[in-house]
Amino acid sequence: MDTTPKKPDEGGFACHNYCVAFIDLLGQREAMRGQGLVPSDRTQLIAKFRDSIGGIVTLQHEAEAMLKTLNAPNPNSPLKAQLPADQHETWDAMMRTRVTTQRWSDGLVSFCCLGDQEIKCHVNGVFALIGLTGTIALLGLAQKRPVRGAIEIAWGVELHEGELYGPAVARAYELESEVAQYPRIVVGPQTYHFLRVHSESTDQDVFSQANRNLARICLDMLFQDEDGYLKVHYLGGAFARWVNKSPDLYPLARAFVVEQFEKHQRELNTKLAFRYANLLRYFLAHPAQAASNGAPEAASTHG
């Protein structure tokens, strides 16, 4: 494969719309505060690794494991098995998705190309990003490693394979850094518009029907927060049904949220106390949703 960087006037770049999820591991600035050269004391070095690098490595490994599942449809899907053999190829095309992750300092950028001609159902990628970010957000709270993030759609260019550049990354980063503020996953207006358009499509071919059904499921996994922005509703019934099969995460996550709220309240940390108060209200308003047993496959996909 030729990995030589192309110049803009060589015409080798393909510009498409991308759906991008930007995920940031919180608390890293505090973990690295006051650090400089490598400490001579090995005990100190191990502690600093655990406080700073350990959380990032764990986040990367968890995201990688989830994406392996999302990018590899179940070959033994019970719904696929019910189809005639001559429809299996169509099923495989309908299920196909491609989500790429780009490591970014103390965070991750995961994205899918909405102009990829090999992908027949582009809503699959958006579904994967909602599932990925929501799961990481809930898991992070349960593991006392909170994250925040955002999902948005805009144009972008892969300057190198797996390295995305453009407003798609910038817009997702802007929503994460300026809007999300506390541990939540904000969903931008272009992503919402994309899902609404597909959910209202009247096209009847099999791929359009799959996109329509899955877009409706994605919309059910969103929730309007107190400031008017949409966020991934990882405590909702739709998310529990289609994505989160581990209801035991809820009490662990809620306990951490309560702990952080009370800590920042005692310390008179107004900014963080208010942010965790918002998060605690969300948890109190949405008690644990039991994952449904034997739930059907999402929109006849993700088997």
Image (tube, rainbow, N blue to C red):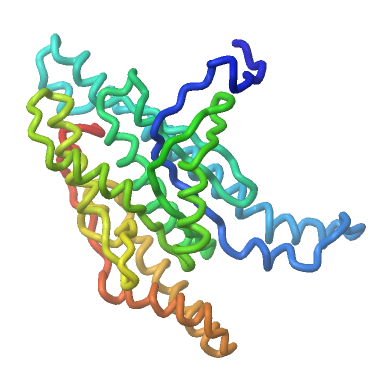
- Residue 196 position, x and y percent, is 20, 46
Residue 121 against residue 282 in the figure, above or below = above
- Residue 72 position, x and y percent, is 36, 27
Residue 190 against residue 78 in the figure, above or below = below
Farthest residue, direction right: 40
Q: Count the numbered circles shown.
A: 0
Asked whether, in this view, residue 68 is left or right of residue 120, the answer is right
Q: Quadrant of the C terminus?
A: top left
Q: Quadrant of the N terminus?
A: top right
- Residue 26 position, x and y percent, is 57, 62
Picture residue at 36% right of the left edge, 35% below the top: 70
- Residue 262 position, x and y percent, is 49, 85
Picture residue at 45% right of the left edge, 57% below the top: 175
> In front: 153, or 147?
153
> In front: 98, or 58?
98
Asked whether, in this view, residue 23 is left or right of residue 253, the answer is right
Picture residue at 43% right of the left edge, 42% below the top: 20
User: In the rendered image, which quarter is residue 209 located in?
Assistant: top left
Picture residue at 16% right of the left edge, 21% below the top: 81
> In front: 150, or 26?
150
